[in-house]
Image: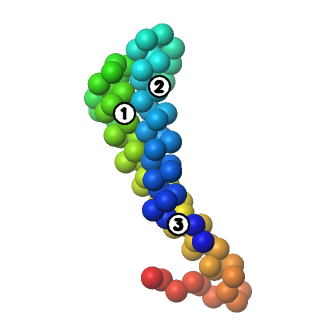
Amino acid sequence: MLNQRAFGLAMGFAYAAYMMVLAWVAALFHVGDQAVAMTRAFYPGYDASFSGGLLGAAYGFATGFALGWGMAWLYNRFRNAAVNEPGDLAPMD
């Protein structure tokens, strides 16, 4: 079984780092400007700047944690269902 909180934290930190580095690289080297512009459609205030990178890290952590926690929860549900008898579902916690 996957630890949902640990998997969520790992995904959150990874996505936060990605969002922050993307914004800062776009601000310094103008590489990835289009990716930042497309991402801005989903995360208001995110842009290619220092403050945009910090805001992007916060957005990235929240999104990554939620998705990671959800993926671990689904994995655990499917894993428990596969271990039980065919046709049986895992009990809900």
Instruction: Say which element carries label 1.
Output: helix
Q: Which residue is mark 3?
A: 3
Mark 1 or mark 3: which is in front?
A: 3
Residue at image location 50% in from the left, 42% down from the top = 14
Circle 2 packing at 10 Å, graded few (<14), some (14-19), many (20+), is many
User: Residue 88 at what x, y percent from top left?
Assistant: 63, 88
User: Residue 47 at what x, y percent from top left?
Assistant: 35, 23
N-term mark: 2 or 1: 2
Instruction: Say which element carries label 2.
Output: helix
Q: Which residue is mark 1?
A: 56
Q: Quadrant of the N terminus?
A: bottom right
Residue at image location 48% in from the left, 83% down from the top = 92
Q: Which residue is mark 2?
A: 22
Q: In the rendered image, is residue 48 in sight? A: yes
In the displayed structure, would residue 12 be above or below residue 21?
below
Tag 3: residue type? Answer: Asn
Residue at image location 45% in from the left, 17% down from the top = 26
Tag 2: residue type? Answer: Leu
User: Residue 8 at what x, y percent from top left?
Assistant: 47, 56
In the displayed structure, would residue 31 be above or below residue 7?
above
Tag 1: residue type? Answer: Gly
Would you say 20 lies left or right of 46 here? Answer: right
